[in-house]
Amino acid sequence: MDYQQLIDEVYHEVKSANPKGKVADYIPELAKVNPDHFGIALVDLEGKVYGAGDFDIPFSIQSISKVLTLTMVAHVFKDKLWSRVNVEPSGNPFNSIAQLEFEKGIPRNPFINAGALVITDALTSIHNDPLEKIHGFINEIVGRTCVQIDESVMNSEIAHSERNTALAYFLKAYGNFENDIQDVIRTYCGQCAIELCCADLARSFSFLANQGYSIFANRQILSPIDTQRINALMLTCGFYDESGEFAFRVGLPGKSGVGGGIVAVMPNKFSVAVWSPPLNAKGNSPKGVKALQLLREKLKYSLFEERK
Ligand SMILES: NC(=O)CC[C@H](N)C(=O)O
């Protein structure tokens, strides 16, 4: 399969279909991004990068960071972590407060905001400077020092963090939060404000396509079973209340963020990242979803069947 030809075709077909969305503005600083950016990068298991469009321009990874923080604590906490966070799709918006109360402070999964706050809290319990650790980890799995934080996005999100802070207080009220709430919110906003380009994002997720081994870090990041679990979570929960739709249309484990990025993996084949800032009502990028759907349809194999 000629991956460069594949993503060039996808890029041009999506550009001409031009599905519409609206740039997120509930974090005011995010609304300033140029909505016309569009890029795709695919990384094969030898580490070769194939790019189209704005694949080398950094953007705010937002909720995509939740997969990487989960990776950082998964092996430390083993099964104990899963008593603090469930593994079911939420079917609700990513920042729902009602669901957290209804379920007595145990978030539905680690990719909605409440679950991600528990993960960042767990990370804060084991590291003095968790944000530094997150940077170091991402640089390691990308294979170069590339992580930067958009301070204005971070400060904008901290200044508008009422909902996330409310979620953290709910968690604390149910005894599911160990650290200082403002410290954890700061780290959480910092991890969401990390900027990566599509190429580096796809490189950072390569270990999830490779049974937990990162060819960029030259080490096993997760065991094969934990890798399979994180991929299962991405497949069932990676797109908030549109996770079923994404599995139906694309059928790959993936994660979206309100910066307009989506990253997905085809186990044992490649990782791929797409970026287009406008979002649909569920907080996912319509161009990104379309691109991944077309890409999947053009392949002769899927997650569920090998090439004949
Ligand atoms: N869906 C997202 O990307 C949400 C992340 C965003 N930083 C928030 O907490 O609201």
Image: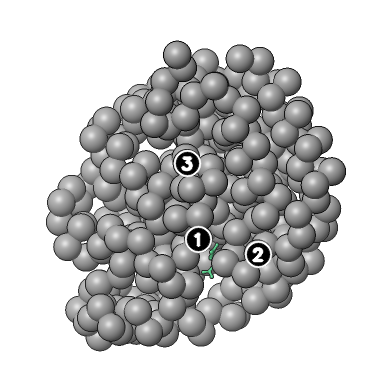
**Helix, strand or loop for disc 3:** loop
Residue 294 vertical position relative to residue 68 in the rendered view, above or below: above
> Looking at the rendering, in which quadrant would you find the N terminus?
top right
Q: Quadrant of the C terminus?
A: top left
Q: Is residue 263 left or right of residue 182?
A: right
Residue that label 3 marks: 251
The reply to whether dot 1 and dot 2 touch (C-beta < 8 Å) is yes
Rendering coords of residue 265 (x, y %): 48, 35
Front residue of 143 and 6: 6
Residue found 59% across the figure and 73% down from its top:
157
Badge count: 3
Is 112 left or right of 154, judged from the image as shown? Answer: left
Residue 173 located left or right of residue 275: left
Q: Pointer 2: what residue?
A: 280
Residue 182 quadrant: bottom left
Residue at the disc numbered 1:
242
Mark positioned earlier in the residue sequence (1 or 2): 1
For the residues marked 2 and 3, what is the alpha-carbon distance in whole angstroms? Answer: 19 Å
Label 2 amino acid?
Asn
Q: Position of residue 262 (x, y in %)?
A: 58, 48
Which residue extends farthest front?
Answer: 308
Q: Position of residue 293 (x, y in %)?
A: 60, 41
Q: Nearer the viewer, mark 2 or mark 3?
A: 3
- Callout 3 environment at 10 Å: few (<14), some (14 to 19), or many (20+)? many
- Given the image, on which type of amino acid does mark 3 rest? Gly
| Residue 76 in view (yes/no) | yes
Residue shown at the point (40%, 82%) measured from the top left: 97
Name the N-terminal-most of marks 2 and 3: 3
Viewer-nearest residue: 158 or 36:
36
